[in-house]
Image (cartoon, rainbow, N blue to C red):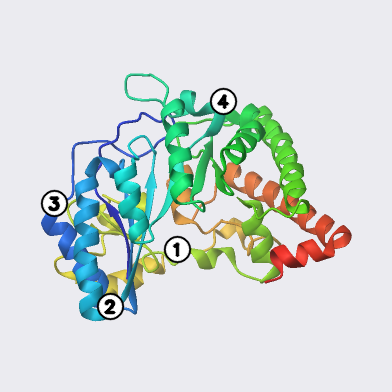
Amino acid sequence: MNFTLHLTENCNLGCVYCPNPKSSKRMSDDVLYAACELAFSRGKGAGFCFFGGEPLLAKDLIYKAIDRCTELSAKTGKKVNYKMTTNGTLLDDAFLERACSVGMMIGLSFDGLMQDKSRCFKDGSGSRETVEKNARLLLSRIPNAYAMMTVAPFAVSSYFDSVRYLYSLGFRRIIATIAYGNKVSWTDSDIDLLRSELDRIAEFYTDILLNGVRFYFSPFDSKITECIKDKNTADHCHLGFRQMPIDTDGSIYPCTQFVGDKEWYIGNVFYGIDVKRQIEISKRASMPEECRECELNRRCTNSCGCTNRLETGDENKISPLTCTYERMIIEISDRIAGDLFNDHYDIFIQRFGR
């Protein structure tokens, strides 16, 4: 089984768009070890994503999880994999050495040139200098580490420059999304500028591919690949089955946006998962009514309960912002793919045909 471990609700940054509550809550050793045991109890392997808050504020718990899972893997013969999402401010050589020893994949939340405005320390000081230094350290040890970029309305004008900046640091995998939730407000002019910046990024992305460099930029890559392979974007969700978050107290939920909401509780690490409840919850995620006749509904994130809940308060109701953004990136991604297919077929096949 795959779990996202919410090791702590504490964080050392004050990101302006973050919707998650902050507190001193921290996972106990007993909860951690029970989560490890549960993950190995079902399925062919175990997977863990270390999450927060900022997970490196609970670095000792990560080490304990690795030690226990190493024992369980040897005992059961099942493989284990690790991921971590971090703000990067606390990365150091010692941790990266341990992470590399177990093949941990690390995603670095980094907003590029707007970092100091969107992701500052609690005292208001900027974090970009620290994160840039640690990003270089991270890439020197894990070259395929990825940057996760959140674009707020006030940062749209720097979107293209920030992608180019992250690329110049050495990131060859960038996952970008816009900021959602009630802490941000998108205007029509913001959306127009977003489109302009995405067009510039599309040109930059295409030029890199034409130069033979392996570069992954989501959302473009994901939209193109899913279209070619005729995948339904909604299939990535599997609410309550694919990647279940575990709260600091050991409660299990179907998705990160539902953590702490007892209406969505599906079990705990000590007594296991309520399978009947799990199935009932999974059936609550469906395509919004207004999307069912749309020609793009299989390529859109309309059924992402997390985003819908964040935007509208209803897991099955899509917001106008999400709809507009999805249409925008699908159109641009299709244009990129069409141009490559028609004018640079060999490169297109090399990049997307496997």
Of callouts 2 and 4, the N-terminal one? 2
Question: For numbered disc 1, what is the local secondary structure?
Answer: loop
Question: For numbered disc 3, what is the local secondary structure?
Answer: loop
Q: In the rendering, at what x and y percent does residue 327 appear?
A: 68, 50
Amino acid type, callout 1 = Ala
Answer with the quarter of the image where residue 13 lies: top left
Q: Quadrant of the C terminus?
A: bottom right
Q: Residues within 10 Å of mark 1 (few under 14, many from 20)?
A: some
The reply to whether dot 3 and dot 2 touch (C-beta < 8 Å) is: no
Looking at the image, which is closer to me, 12 or 264?
12
Question: For numbered disc 2, what is the local secondary structure?
Answer: loop
Instruction: Report, in whole angstroms, how far the alpha carbon at label 3 lies from the one at label 4.
Output: 39 Å
Amino acid type, callout 3 = Ser
Looking at the image, which is closer to me, 325 or 62?
62
Q: Nearer the viewer, mark 2 or mark 1?
A: 2
Instruction: Report, in whole angstroms, how far the alpha carbon at label 2 lies from the one at label 4.
Output: 45 Å
Of callouts 3 and 4, the N-terminal one? 3
Disc number placed over residue 285 in the picture, else none: 1
Amino acid type, callout 4 = Phe
Q: Which residue is mark 3?
A: 28
Instruction: Report, in whole angstroms, how far the alpha carbon at label 1 lies from the one at label 4.
Output: 32 Å
Q: Quadrant of the N terminus?
A: bottom left
Q: Which residue is mark 2?
A: 42
Q: Which residue is mark 4?
A: 154
Q: In the rendering, at what x and y percent does residue 162 appear?
A: 60, 33
Q: Nearer the viewer, mark 1 or mark 3?
A: 3
